[in-house]
Image: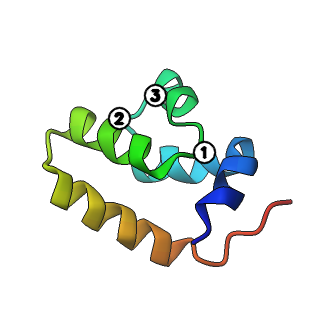
């Protein structure tokens, strides 16, 4: 997954993120703004998981969304 594309199309993409990680608020999503490292940090905070678990979840999410194309 190309996170540069995700950043550039964050408004369209953040719904996918919200669906996956429902504990993340709109404020969290605005702070993340398509940045992978920010997403990992917010997942750790919201779900109380360590960095490795957050990375694992993001990798699984990337695989499921690898065909994302901006509209």
Of residues 27 and 20, the one drawn nearer to the viewer in this rendering: 27
- As drawn, the label of residue 67 is none
Q: Is residue 25 left or right of residue 1?
A: left
Q: Quadrant of the C terminus?
A: bottom right
Q: CA distance from mark 2 to mark 3?
A: 9 Å
Of residues 34 and 46, the one drawn nearer to the viewer in this rendering: 34
Q: Earlier in the sequence, mark 2 or mark 3?
A: 2
Q: Earlier in the sequence, mark 3 or mark 1?
A: 1
Dot in front, 1 or 2 = 1
The residue that disc 2 covers is 23
Determine if residue 9 is in view: no
Q: Earlier in the sequence, mark 1 or mark 2?
A: 1
Q: CA distance from mark 3 to mark 1?
A: 10 Å
- As drawn, the label of residue 28 is 3
Q: Is residue 61 left or right of residue 30?
A: left
Q: Secondary structure at mark 3?
A: helix
Residue extending farthest to the right is 71
Q: CA distance from mark 1 to mark 2?
A: 13 Å
Q: Toward which corner of the image does residue 41 lie, by quadrant?
A: top left
Q: Secondary structure at mark 2?
A: loop
- As drawn, the label of residue 14 is 1
């Amino acid at each position: 997954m190309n996170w540069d594309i995700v950043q550039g199309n964050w408004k369209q993409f953040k719904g996918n993120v919200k669906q996956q990680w429902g504990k993340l608020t709109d404020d969290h999503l605005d702070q993340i703004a398509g940045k992978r490292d920010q997403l990992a940090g917010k997942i750790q905070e919201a779900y109380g998981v360590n960095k490795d678990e957050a990375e694992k979840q993001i990798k699984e999410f990337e695989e499921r969304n690898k065909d994302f194309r901006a509209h």
